[in-house]
Every structure is written in C-alpha cells, then in structure tokens.
Image (cartoon, rainbow, N blue to C red):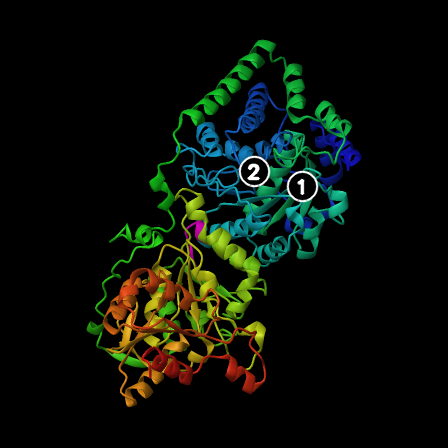
C-alpha cells in the first residue's frame, strides 16, 4: 500500500496530472453520462485548476496548518487531562478536507465520522467553539454534550461527527435525498474511513443513492488502517471500485496532495451536481498518530510513519511550492504565528469557559411543546404531571373506519397539509403496503412522496433520519417492527440522541411505524412486542394505538411532532372497525391516556390489542359484581403517570395487561410507579398479565397458551380483589 501511495504521489503532481489527463482522456467541462459508466476504471479529471498563484497557495497552507496545529494542541490538552474519552486526531490527512471544501458550494452539506476536528475547521467553524467542545465546556458547539466525536453546526451545514462506524454514510445519503427533494442544488458530502467502507449500510446507501440518482459525494479517506488492522488485511479489492456494481463512478486520488484532491473533487461535484447521481472518491492518505490518543500504534513501524512524514507530508509539499513561487520566509512565518495564536487562543478559551450548568443535564432531550416547555424536563426527572388537555367528547361527528383506514386517513391528512411529509418503506407504493395501510397514496401523492425502498431497513432508516435532520418529515414504514431490529442503531443512536448531542441544533421530525406484537401463527421472529425496547430510550416518543380514533389521532400527532416518534401498530387490529371523528382538528396529544371504561373496584391498564381484551374482561367482571376501570395508555413514552395514579387512588387496585414479556416490561414500569407514588393507596399488590416468557411458538395450541388472554385478566383482577 505504501508503494501504491508513492507511485500515485509521483504520478499526480500538478504538471504531470494535467498532462496525463489531457493526453489520455480529452477532458471536458464535466464527465458525460456515457463516460461516467467507465469512470470507475479510469482516472478522469476535469475542470483542472490553472497553476496555483501565491494567494491560493497561502490560503491552502493557512487552512491545512490550522488543522495541524489545532490537532497538536488538542493532543497536548488530552495529555494534560483536559480532554477526556476518545480523541481522534486528523494529523496527516489535512489535504483531504481542505481540497474538497475549497470547491463546495454554500448549500452543500457535510457529514463525517469521529475523526472530525479537521472537517469542522474546514467548514469554517470557530476553533474556540470546537476546542471548548473537546474539553466539555459550555462554550462548545454542543455546550459540552457531544464532545470530540459528536459536534455539529447547523449554521455551517456541518451535520456531525458521528461515533457509530458507517452511520454517517446512510445519514449523508439522507441529506442528499433532502437536497433532491427540495431541489435546492445542494450536494451532500459524506466522508467515511476505510474501515467504514466495509459496513453493510454503506452498500445499502450506495444502492439507494444510485437508484434515485441522489446528489451525494462519498469520500473514502483511506488512511491505510481501520483501528490497528491495515487495509490490506481487512478489505478485498479497491474500495472505490465497489461502487461499480451499482453503476457509481469513482476514482482514487493522492490525498497527500491538496491540488490533486481539489481537482478530483471539482470533477466529482460537477458530475453529481449535474443530476447524474452519486460519485465515490477514494483518497489515499495517512494518519501520523494512532487511531486515537490512547493508541500507541505499535502495529506499524517508525520507518513507515517517517516515510510519509518526510516524503509525502501535505503541508511540506505546499510549503515547497510556496518557496518556489517566491513567497518569502517572512510571509510564511507571519502565517505560522497567526495560526499558533489562533490555536493558543482556542485552548485558553476552552479552559476559561465554564463547565455546563447542572440544569443542562435535562435540556434538549426533546424539542419541547410550545404550550408547556417544561413538560419534557419534568417527565425526564420522574415527576407526575397532568397530561395535555384534550376535549375528546367535543368531536361528535364520526364515521365507521377500520384501524387500517384510520391510519391511512391520518397520513393522507398530514401529507395534504404539509408538503415536507413523505412515506417510504418496503412495498408502500406500487403494492399499496404489505397490509394495505398505504393503499391509494401513490395515486394521490406520486412517486416523489410515496417511495418503495429496497429491503434494506438499516439503510433506509438512516436515510430517513438524515433527511429529517435537514428539515423533511419522513414516515418510515417497517413491514413489521421485528424488522426494525435491523434499523435500531439509527432509531436510537441517530434519531433519538442527536438533538441532545448537538446541543439542540438538529431536530429529527420522523415517524417510524409498523405492525408490532403477535400476529397469527407466524412464529417467534415475527411476533415480538417492542414497546419496552423503544420506551426505554430518552429522546424517543412511543405510541401504541388500539382503536380507529387512536390510530387517526396519534398518527397526526406523531407526524406533527418535531421529535422522533415510534408508532407501534398491531396487525390483528388493522381490520377491526370503530367510530372515528372525521374532523381534521382531531389530534390526540401524545402523553395523554384515555379512560375507556370507568370503574370503582380495580384499574386495568393496557395498550394496543390488550385494551380490547381488557374491555372484554371488564364486561365479564361486571357480571360478577366487580367494577373495573380500563385505561388505554395510547402513549407508552411519555407515560401518562397522572391518569394511572389518579385511577389507583380511586380503585386502590391495579392490573397491568400487555402482550410483551414480563421481565422489564411496561407493566413492571407501572408497578414501580405505583410503589413510588401510590403505595399507601394500594390495597393489594400490583398484578401483571403478560405473554409467557418464551419465544412465541408456532403450534396453535402453544401460541394460545403463550399469549395473554381475557381469562387471565379476569383471574388477575379477582386475585387483587381477594375473590
């Protein structure tokens, strides 16, 4: 690999680079579509810069030197214990982001992984704010909540800094999707390392970007090592050529030469911006330091590192060009002093900046409700607060709908209301949805807004999340929530956490929805209730409709919410009919439960399909003289603690019914709630009715035994009533 880089370095000096391109390829203003088909096999360069003048040389020298000196200062602060955790330095790779950023346009977006300090500085972010974030201070870009790996600037169109390897590629594909959807002429530049280039979601992203001709420039910063494993031991073939199977052109360029990078990036961006779809730029570079500051890098020799430092260093290269162009030593020293002063000032600012106020712990978990901005903070702190007001009885004009039709109506109303709302998922368009929830939407809204995806949950969940970061409002449908396990990384690590890590800069107005829980004889892998999984996560809202009214009102609320919302539907419920309010103003507040049946002797709390079973149980109990109050939770997170506790104070007994497993379930959370806030009101222990603690079996008799039934609710109620 070292020899390959040396050969490229010799071949791609500015003069030779120009002669080779002109001689062999008859360069035009942009790559034509016909030539693009073979671009993966050719080193195509267009729009080559003329011989750089003194000002351009000084500009590049200043920008790369800023990154180098900033990172050296970061290393010093890490050694002093002022920077904690992981700190990944960009020393040696400065030419990559400097060359690419020089030919971007203001509307372009940038996203990268955790070796991100150089990208931030190249995007124009203030070194003071970057260093303050590295030291976890209130003056940082994320006010100390993100740190080295998670830093953002919405103002500079820099979308992070992401600590999950490869996640930024799917998210960046979503940024490209948002540019095309809006028609704003922007290109998403998604950086990845050579290690991330082996991630499955990268290829899911390539596929979607190629299918939909998304304006994305994928930049592989091949610095020769993943963590400690060299590329030659971890990756088969040439990384950029992996795009050939998707019809994505690409090339390999000397990443230690800022002008070679600039020329290749200019061509690539021109190609992408012209509507041709994505492009892959593999930039051969080298990191001088270990993977992170804690890595002694003993997996490579000192001679190898010295070879790059002495013969291919990007800053030394441009310094030599500056000297040849007659730029004096005094001018160079002025730049050097200027950069050192900037970095020293940034370090001092970071140390002078105070630690975040303790109250910051509770801010930016969610974008707060306008009418009560303290609600989310109080909920996170475990307070019992009255739910949002809602006069449901005033909606008297109703019509009969199935749950399926109500869900569809909710999406239709919101898509008509807001052009930024779109639906994507497997089979949602031409097939009208696996369960026909999206039937007719393609005819009304067209292929731009009702989008069939490949079977790539990890990839399209990341794409949808990235699009939401840039202001769109995706509805992401999973054919079953069981398949959301493929996507859970983006649901939790990207959608739920980024607002907090970004210090409130990046919201994520997205809906993840699909059938949840048991179906009918489809076995263990298609029959799980994920309520407690998703309800466990700060930054998510989770709703679980039962009736048609729930389906319509919660769907509309979820789409309007500026935060990520998971809608747990139920396949068995899709065909059941209810009376549903027809008013377009019918929007059920997230966080408010409903008392479906009033009672005095016992409270039954349920959600989704179990509400119907609880209602049946209440009927049977009434025949035996027991008055049961049934609460339909509707929202799992934030849980309506107030309504539950008010009911328990009245009935003094509670049974929790859920289709999930008992361990760490929603019923367990409600039991803890009652112990903490209603202990003196209880006349009996909290009872739970759950699925058997086994994978759901296929055999019809065993399946019935495993799932909670009406009779079990009746028996649990009689037990807490001592009957």
Label number found at residue 86: 2
Quadrant position of residue 401: bottom left
Instruction: Please identify the residue farthest to the left as the structure is shown.
Output: 394
Q: Sequence order check: which comes first, mark 2 or mark 1?
A: 2
Q: Is residue 321 visible?
A: yes
* Front residue (pair 195, 523): 523
Range shown magenta: 468-474
**Left or right: where 26 falls relative to 413:** right
Position in image of residue 81 (x %, y %): 53, 29
Q: Is residue 337 above or below residue 699?
A: above
Q: Is residue 12 above or below residue 240?
A: above
**Left or right: where 580 falls relative to 423:** left
Position in image of residue 546 (x %, y %): 37, 75
Asked which secondary structure carries label 2, the reply is loop
- In magenta segment, residue 469: yes
Q: Nearer the viewer, mark 2 or mark 1?
A: 2
- In magenta segment, residue 556: no
Q: How many residues crowd around disc 2 within 10 Å: few (fewer than 14), some, or many (20 or more)?
A: some
Position in image of residue 101 (x %, y %): 55, 35
Q: Residue at x 55, y 29 (%)?
A: 78
Number of numbered labels in the structure image: 2
Distance between the Cα atoms at labels 2 and 1? 13 Å
Residue indicated by mark 1: 227
* Front residue (pair 68, 496): 496
């Amino acid at each position: 690999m070292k020899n390959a880089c040396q050969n490229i370095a010799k071949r791609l000096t500015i003069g030779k680079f120009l002669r080779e391109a002109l001689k062999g390829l008859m360069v035009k203003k942009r790559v034509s579509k016909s030539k693009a088909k073979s671009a993966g096999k050719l080193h195509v360069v267009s729009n080559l810069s003329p011989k750089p003048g003194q000002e351009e040389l000084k500009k590049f020298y200043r920008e790369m030197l800023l990154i180098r000196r900033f990172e050296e200062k970061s290393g010093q602060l890490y050694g002093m214990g002022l920077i904690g955790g992981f700190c990944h330095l960009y020393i040696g790779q400065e030419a990559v982001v400097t060359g690419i950023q020089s030919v971007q346009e203001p509307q372009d977006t940038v996203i990268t992984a955790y070796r991100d300090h150089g990208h931030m500085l190249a995007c124009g972010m203030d070194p003071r704010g970057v260093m303050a974030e590295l030291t976890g201070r209130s003056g940082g870009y994320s006010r100390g909540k993100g740190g080295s790996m998670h830093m953002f600037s919405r103002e500079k169109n820099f979308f992070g800094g992401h600590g999950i390897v490869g996640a930024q590629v799917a998210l960046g594909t979503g940024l490209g999707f948002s540019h095309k959807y809006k028609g704003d002429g922007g290109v998403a530049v998604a950086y990845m390392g050579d290690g991330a280039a082996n991630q499955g979601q990268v290829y899911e992203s390539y596929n979607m970007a190629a299918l939909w001709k998304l304006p994305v420039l994928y930049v592989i910063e091949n610095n020769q090592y993943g963590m400690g494993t060299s590329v030659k031991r971890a990756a088969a073939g040439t990384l950029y050529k992996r795009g050939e199977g998707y019809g994505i052109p690409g090339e390999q360029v000397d990443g230690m030469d800022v002008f070679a990078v600039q020329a290749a990036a200019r061509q690539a961006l021109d190609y992408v911006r012209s509507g041709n779809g994505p492009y892959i730029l593999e930039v051969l570079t080298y990191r001088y330091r270990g993977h992170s500051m804690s890595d002694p890098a003993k997996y490579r020799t000192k001679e190898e590192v010295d070879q790059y430092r002495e013969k291919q260093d990007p800053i030394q290269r441009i310094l030599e060009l500056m000297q040849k162009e007659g730029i004096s030593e005094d001018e160079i020293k002025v730049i050097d002093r200027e950069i050192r002063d900037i970095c020293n000032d940034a370090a001092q600012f970071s140390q002078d900046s105070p630690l975040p106020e303790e109250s910051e712990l509770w801010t930016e978990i969610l974008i707060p409700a306008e009418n009560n901005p303290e609600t989310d903070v109080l909920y996170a702190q475990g307070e019992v607060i009255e739910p949002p007001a809602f006069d449901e009885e005033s909606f008297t004009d109703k019509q009969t709908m199935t749950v399926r039709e109500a869900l569809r109506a909710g999406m239709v109303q919101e898509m008509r209301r807001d052009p930024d709302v779109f639906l994507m998922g497997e089979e949602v368009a031409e097939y009208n949805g696996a369960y026909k929830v999206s039937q007719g939407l393609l005819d009304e809204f067209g292929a731009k807004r009702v989008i069939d995806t490949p079977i790539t949950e990890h990839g399209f969940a990341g794409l949808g999340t990235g699009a939401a970061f840039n202001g769109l409002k995706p509805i992401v449908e999973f054919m079953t929530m069981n398949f959301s396990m493929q996507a859970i990384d983006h649901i939790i690590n990207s959608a739920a956490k980024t607002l907090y890590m970004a210090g409130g800069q990046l919201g994520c107005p997205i809906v993840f929805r699909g059938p949840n829980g048991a179906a009918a004889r489809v076995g263990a892998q298609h029959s799980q209730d994920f309520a407690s999984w998703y309800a466990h996560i700060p930054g998510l809202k989770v709703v679980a409709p039962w009736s048609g009214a729930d389906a319509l009102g919660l769907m509309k609320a979820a789409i309007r919410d500026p935060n990520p919302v998971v809608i747990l539907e139920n396949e068995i419920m899709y065909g059941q009919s209810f009376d549903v309010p027809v008013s377009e103003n019918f929007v059920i507040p997230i966080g408010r439960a409903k008392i479906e049946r009033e009672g005095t002797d016992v409270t039954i709390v349920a959600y989704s399909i179990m509400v119907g079973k609880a209602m049946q149980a209440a009927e049977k109990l009434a025949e035996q003289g027991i008055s049961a109050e049934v609460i339909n939770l509707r929202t799992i997170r934030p849980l309506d603690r107030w309504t539950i506790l008010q009911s328990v104070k009245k009935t003094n007994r509670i049974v929790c019914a859920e289709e999930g497993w008992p361990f760490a379930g929603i019923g367990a959370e409600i039991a803890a709630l009652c112990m903490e806030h209603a202990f003196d009101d209880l006349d009996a222990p909290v009872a739970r009715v759950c699925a058997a603690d086994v994978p759901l079996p296929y055999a019809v008799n065993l399946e019935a035994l495993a799932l909670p039934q009406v009779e079990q609710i009746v028996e649990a109620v009689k037990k807490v009533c001592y009957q």
